[in-house]
Image (spheres, coloured by chain):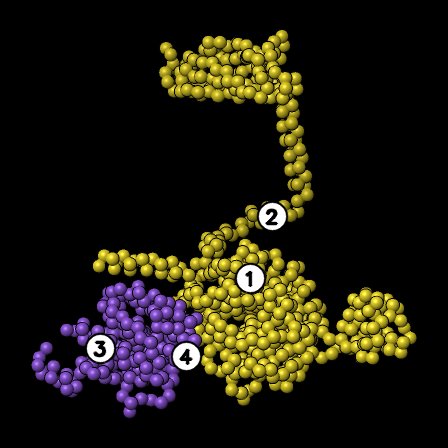
Chain colours: A purple, B yellow
Amino acid sequence: MGLLDRLSGLLGLKKKEVHVLCLGLDNSGKTTIINKLKPSNAQSQDIVPTIGFSIEKFKSSSLSFTVFDMSGQGRYRNLWEHYYKEGQAIIFVIDSSDKLRMVVAKEELDTLLNHPDIKHRRIPILFFANKMDLRDAVTSVKVSQLLCLENIKDKPWHICASNAIKGEGLQEGVDWLQDQIQGAKT
Amino acid sequence: MAAKSSSDSDSGGAESNETNSKWLDAHYDPMANIHTFSSCLALADLHGDGENKLVVGDLGPGGRNPHLKVLKGPAVLAESPLPSLPAAVATFLMEQHDSRTPALALASGPCVYVYKNLRPYFKFTLPQLPPNPLEQDLWNQAKEDRIDPLTLKEMLEGIREKAEIPLSEQSLRFLQLELSDMEAFVNQNKSKTIKRQTVITTMTTLKKTLADEDAISCLVLGTENKGLLVIDPEAFTVLAEMDIPSVPVFLDASGQFDVEFELAAACRNGNIYILKRDSKHPKYSIELSIQPVGLVRVHKILVVGSTQESLHGFTHKGKRLWTVQMPAAIMTMNLLEQHSRGLQAVMVALANAEVRIYHDKVLLNVIRTPDPVTSLCFGRYGREDNTLIMTTRGGGLIIKILKRTAVFVEGTGEMGPPPAQATKISVPRKTRLYVDQTLREREAGTGMHQTFQTDLYLLRIRAARAYVQALESSLTPLSATSREPLKLHAVVQGLGPTFKLILHLQNTSTTRPALGLLVCFLYNEELYALPRAFFKVPLLVPGLIYPLETFVQSLSNKGTSDIIRVLVLREGQSTPLLSAHISMPVSEGLAAA
């Protein structure tokens, strides 16, 4: 890594581009999270269910993220796998208040982890146990138990409790993701 | 690394077990305390928030504590007590210019309670029926005190037995009373006008003008009075009234009320009546001759479950298409509709704690449940489209979600008919000879039968004669005389030229031992040599088998064999008691020479 690169990196002129996939069931809050991570002048006011997918960009302190915000609706979930190859990290969002569909989230996660494009890559996965503010939400520890996250042994992963509407917990997750990506690069 | 790979394979193994199932177990609560039937389950987005709720007309444990429950996810969202047991629950859109939140209709007794946004909105009561004039007259007399309660009771009982119009509730209650209470009851009720009211047995919805998913629907009610009513959803007036010959228990409606519709009503007399828009009376009738336990329309086929553990498919004109036998009694049935794949199938819950899914008569899937399922429904629940909700006999609630990747393939279900059954056999064309023969058979059938019978009798008599002859000349290895019941069984051992001949002799009498018996062999002396051709048999104790052994030497080396006859004789008698023919095997070794 050249001195110039490092200098420009420090100055925030040229940041490294990272492709991230944002996955999760419908109504889990993927678009809301991405929206909250964008600079405040670029945030949109109302969030509608995503159709197909949308591409969003935001910057952290040292990286420039390009997020594929995939639609979580059942009929669009088969689109996910077409973007696995390009993704350098995955954000998986879970609705902590939807206990009934936790099994569905687990099923989708297992399908994701067993996909040939993902299975043998050491790709960091960030889990957001979203909607923590809701009364019937379960804790992030419980979510990781329900999704059997302890079985993921060949990939770095991290789970954060979050409240995407207020933006709580998001920065913690993004910082972890940034560390992981940079750690993998250097 | 090795540890990692092994743990991977472990999880893989557990998943492969799970992938065999098409269902994800989302929730199971054996203590949910929901006791209900499929007709009292409905799924709808009652609040318009995009999440479907489950509406349950709960009968309560033992049918004593009816409640209306609304479930969201695994938990009960709202609950309100009901005045009487629910008969059916349905959700429907009632106004065209509405916020698209469906109303909830609950049929109970003679009323339909309509809720909007989970608040009571309207109560529709079935129109009253004209009372029996005789009964009316009697109560009028009672009012004027011209008749005493005892006579009133006798007269009413007379009406109850004979009259075509049944008694009112008031009279029926009066007839149940003890003598002492009658007077008071008459005094209390004589001034009231008698009312006759029927109750709702079943309810379903029927689209009014448009077939769209979000078009308004009418309610269709089946009553104990052998009638069907179509109710307008906005004004709650009776749009149409139809009579059928029996009491409907299951209803199915298709089409639109204003255009063309078809109602199928399975009734208590074991018949299914099919009514069309312009007919006041049934257009077709299907006679099952057994009681129906469920009625589901799959595309154009009516699938009926019967009490004889079978599932029948009928066309809408009443032609039976197929019958499938179930391994256990049917508890309940409902429709499985997977919109994303355009699949319609029937779910059948059985008494052996299985839920089977049939597409026509092909078994698609079997779900085993911890307890027999009493009610089930499939549809969008919460935000998940393909959810199966079941309640069990013990009051449990099971929620399963169909996997996104699951595909029902015909023939993957267990215990389906073998695929060979479906292959067509190429039947040869009818030949001229075949046709002639068939014609001849048709014309001279009686003669052929008689000839056959004569021959059969002749054959039988000949067989009987031969048997008697064999018995008389003691040619059989079983002795026929009652004094010496004997059984003989001979075995030849060895390859030759020396054979061992073992005679198993048994005295089959229960008490008497056999004494003084002789065994004699008759054989061709050129072929065989026996060291002893004649010997005495020891005392035969009843029941035991005595093996008597002797050697047989084959003399011929030409590969011929012969029969050796064994005779069992009684001392001092010339006729044998029994005889046996032993066909000797060909000697495989060379003769002794």
Q: Position of residue B539 (x, y in %)?
A: 57, 13
Amino acid type assigned to the residue bearing label 1 in the image: Gly
Question: Is there a contact, CB below 8 Å, between mark 3 and mark 2?
Answer: no
The Cα–Cα distance between marks 3 and 2, rounded to whole angstroms, is 89 Å
Give whichever of discs 4 and 3 has the lower sequence position: 4
Question: Is there a contact, CB below 8 Å, between mark 4 and mark 2?
Answer: no
Quadrant in the picture for residue B306: bottom right
**Front-lying residue, B408 or A33:** A33
Query: Which dot, 4 or 2, sits closer to the camera?
Result: 4
Residue visible at 84% across and 67% down? B180
**Side (left or right) of A38 relative to B151:** left
- Please report, as a chain letter, where disc 3 is located: A
Quarter of the image containing the C terminus of chain B? top left
The Cα–Cα distance between marks 1 and 3, rounded to whole angstroms, is 53 Å
Q: Secondary structure at mark 4?
A: loop
Query: Which dot, 1 or 4, sits closer to the camera?
Result: 4
Discs 4 and 2 share one subunit: no
Q: Is residue A113 above or below residue B419?
A: below
Discs 3 and 2 share one subunit: no
Quarter of the image containing the N terminus of chain B? bottom left
Q: Secondary structure at mark 3?
A: helix
The Cα–Cα distance between marks 1 and 2, rounded to whole angstroms, is 61 Å
Q: Which residue is under mark 4? A: A134
Amino acid type assigned to the residue bearing label 3 in the image: Gln
For the question of whether residue B281 can be seen, the reply is no
Discs 1 and 3 share one subunit: no
Q: How many marks?
A: 4
Disc on res. A178: 3
Q: Is residue B215 above or below residue B148?
A: below
Q: Which residue is under mark 1? A: B394
Residue visible at 34% across and 65% down? A148
Q: Which residue is under mark 2? A: B438
